[in-house]
Amino acid sequence: MRTSLLCLVVIASAHLPAFAWNALGHKVIAEIAWETLSPEKQSKIADTLKRHPRYAEDFRDLETDQEIFLHAATWPDIARGIRGPDRDKFDKPIWHYVNFPIGDGKTNLATNPKESKSISWNVMQATNFCESVVNSDAPPQEKALAYSWLLHLVGDAHQPMHSTALFSERFPKGDRGGNSLKLAKGQNLHSVWDNFIGRSHALNNVRLKAYQLKAQPEFWDVDTTGNISDWIEESHKLAVEFAYDDAILKAILGTEDIPPIVLPESYYKQAGEHARARVVAAGLRLGAMLGGNQEHIAKNQTSKPAYDSEVEDRSPLAAEPTSKVNAKIEVSTSPATGYWLNTNTNVRHNPSCTNFKNTKNGRHCGPNEGKPCGICGG
């Protein structure tokens, strides 16, 4: 009997890591995958996602197939905030990670439990399951759910803090993928890795970040023929060899009293490079899993996205823009009519949005007309 995605219920645990990549990271991964797909594939997947059982509640104000696809990649994190009985139905906390141990070597975790309807699935098993659903004759609602999870989990698998947990006297049950490791300035190790791509996930910024990554061709020579276990192994190796560096291990192992850890600037710089490489690898591998081809990328993004100071991310952890790929483009509009109103949906778009003057029916409008776009902020 085929396992139904809608029937799997997961109980939350007190020892879970937080989000993997933030919304921007997941959307950039999805954007890279989207660009590998043919128009026919893009349309087919988007049409399936429109059958998502939470589409009306969680996919509001999305006007294009691309927006729906990118948003779906963040939906498993959105599901964490669902209220009422639907949360147990849709939120699957431990699907996001696997805890391969690092530390004192005394812990033996079962990282590959037998598949069942239990709560013990990890990111590897959940990914394999969702891939099988999207390639099956499952009902459209189940396929839509599976696509949302697949778009998300391939990204999670490439985040090193979702492959590994550190065990020590201070953390006998693990450090929750770095969430329990407090750094200076109120951060923790997990959140630092989450945010290396930046923060603003407005559509134009997502497209701009993906475009900027193309200025680093060394990231794009990626083997897409492996599987989820291979990708987790890569993430674990990165966690062991770099993310949990000697400064962190020396501060933690053998002690119970750990002050906030100060990491050198060189750590942030190198970690940012690793994170951006993992995002590109995740996007290309996700695209291949969905039947995409890297040759489509040049066709699907032929123009440089405009830089807009209102939506572009200037986080110090974000990828540093270069003059070649991030020239500022000024948009001259009068305050009274500097926005675009989709008269079918009553949604307002600012000039940075791909829907600005690009909807089937619409007109120029002021800043207080209609409701703001959920992507650009209106």
Image: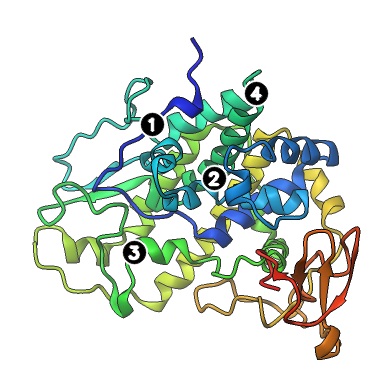
For label 3, the SS is helix
Q: Which of the labelled discs sits on residue 281, or is there none? A: none
* Residue 144 showing in the rendered view: yes
Q: CA separation, marks 2 and 4?
A: 17 Å
Q: CA separation, marks 3 and 4?
A: 36 Å
Q: Residue under circle 3?
A: 189
Q: Residue under circle 4?
A: 135
Q: Is residue 1 above or below residue 267?
A: above
C-beta proximity under 8 Å, tags 1 and 3 = no
Q: Nearer the observer, disc 1 or disc 2?
A: 1
Q: Residue under circle 1?
A: 9
Q: CA separation, marks 1 and 2?
A: 18 Å
Q: Which x, y percent locates residue 341? A: 82, 70
C-beta proximity under 8 Å, tags 1 and 4 = no
C-beta proximity under 8 Å, tags 3 and 2 = no
- Among the two numbered marks 1 and 2 on one chain, the one whose residue lies closer to the N terminus: 1
- Tally of numbered tags: 4
> Residue flagged by tag 4: what amino acid is it?
Asn
C-beta proximity under 8 Å, tags 2 and 4 = no
Q: Nearer the observer, disc 1 or disc 3?
A: 1
The image quarter containing residue 219 is bottom right
> Residue flagged by tag 3: what amino acid is it?
Leu
Q: Which x, y percent locates residue 354? A: 80, 65
Q: CA separation, marks 1 and 4?
A: 22 Å
Q: In this view, does 264 lie above or below 281?
A: below
Q: Nearer the observer, disc 1 or disc 4?
A: 1
Q: CA separation, marks 3 and 2?
A: 21 Å
Q: Which x, y percent locates residue 280? A: 62, 53
Q: Residue under circle 2?
A: 152
> Residue flagged by tag 2: what amino acid is it?
His
Q: Residue at x 48, y 66 (%)?
A: 195
> Residue flagged by tag 1: what amino acid is it?
Val
